[in-house]
Amino acid sequence: MRAPAALFFETRARLNASTAITLKRGRAERRMRARIRSLMRDKNKRTSRVTTGTPHHPAFRTQWF
């Protein structure tokens, strides 16, 4: 039978290794998703809202009597 201290450290090392793998994997997935979102945002840019000329309608509606 193993000593309690050896069993404790072995279990703790196994837990640390498994959490390290999951943390690495989680960070990589978040980076990947963020990059895809930014690529789609660049692709779907709308530039038609830029006004370069005079408007077709006056700013204030006036009524002539």
Image (cartoon, rainbow, N blue to C red):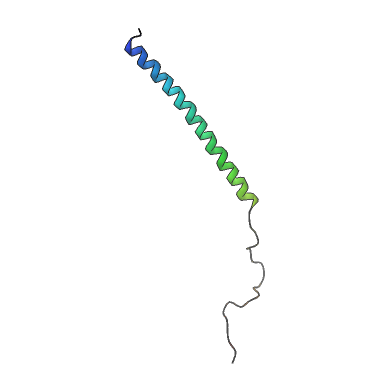
Residue nearer the viewer, 56 or 9: 9
Residue 30: % across, % down: 52, 38
**Residue for point 64% across, 66% down:** 51
- From the viewer's perspective, is residue 14 above or below residue 43? above
**Residue for point 37% across, 16% down:** 9
* Residue found at the far left of this picture: 4
- From the viewer's perspective, is residue 23 above or below residue 42? above
Residue 33: % across, % down: 56, 41
Pick the quarter of the image with the C terminus.
bottom right
* Residue found at the far bottom of this picture: 65
Residue 11: % across, % down: 39, 18
Residue 60: % across, % down: 56, 79
**Residue for point 46% across, 24% down:** 18
- From the viewer's perspective, is residue 60 above or below residue 26? below
- From the viewer's perspective, is residue 28 above or below residue 42? above
* Residue found at the far front of this picture: 1
Q: Looking at the rendering, which quadrant does residue 28 occupy?
A: top right
Q: Looking at the rendering, which quadrant does residue 45 occupy?
A: bottom right
